[in-house]
Amino acid sequence: MASALLVGISLFLAAPGSTYRWSFLLLLPLVWGVYFWRDRLALLPWHFAAFCVAIIIHDLGTFGFYKKIFFGLRFDSYVHFMFGFVAGLILFHAAGQKLPLSRKLLAFAIPIFILGIGGIHEMFECLTTILLGPERGMLKLHPDQPFDTQKDLMNNFLGAIVAVLISLRHRRQPAEEPSSGSDEFEAGLRKKHFGESGDWH
């Protein structure tokens, strides 16, 4: 379902010449990459669903949402917070299940790690603008937003911190057997999110 939405938005709803016309070529590998790594990430069905929702909300930029302001904040602020939040939930749970690390250590390490991922993303945005120019590049330079990169990283970081605080309220569950992870993940998707048929592609 998420895949169909991303392709449909890009091919049928994006304006000709828009950079979102081919955004699905970058976003689909992200969605499927997380799905195929579900065992290594100890991925919960609702975490994956939240990740897909975040991807789709980002793609609303097709309709000019990144130029809009909601409740005093730019749409971009909500998106970066959401990605930090979802990544924090996924990585805190994965590390807690797969690594012999204390929850206190993870509470510090996960937000810093996500901040690093956000920094890499910001550098990639900058590179696309250097190579493709300000019109087609991902980094949009606006005179009224001189601290856009810092703001994006701050929202990533705040989202990760909120995710960690929520995760700390839940007890660590014992790791599941690796062989049963995929079956439980797919059963959860069918029952909780996508219907008994499991047809969510």
Image (cartoon, rainbow, N blue to C red):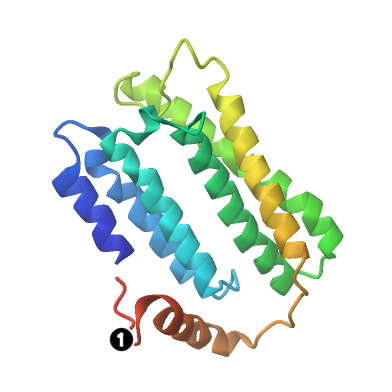
Q: Is residue 179 above or below residue 28?
A: below
The percent position of residue 133, horizontal first and vertical second, equals 33, 19
Q: How many marks?
A: 1
Q: Which residue is mark 1?
A: 197
Q: Is residue 156 above or below residue 187?
A: above
**Left or right: where 132 falls relative to 18:** right
Q: Quadrant of the N terminus?
A: bottom left
Graded by Cα atoms within 10 Å as few (under 14), some (14 to 19) or many (20 or more), the crowding at tag 1 reads: few
**Left or right: where 109 falls relative to 9:** right
User: Residue visible at 39% across and 23% down?
Assistant: 129
Please identify the residue farthest to the top as the structure is shown.
Answer: 143
Q: Amino acid at mark 1?
A: Ser
The percent position of residue 114, horizontal first and vertical second, equals 64, 47
The percent position of residue 74, horizontal first and vertical second, equals 47, 30
User: Residue visible at 72% across and 56% down?
Assistant: 164
User: Residue visible at 45% across and 79% down?
Assistant: 192
Q: Is residue 3 above or below residue 108?
A: below
Q: Quadrant of the C terminus?
A: bottom left
SS at circle 1: loop
The percent position of residue 20, horizontal first and vertical second, equals 27, 39
**Left or right: where 139 falls relative to 162:** left
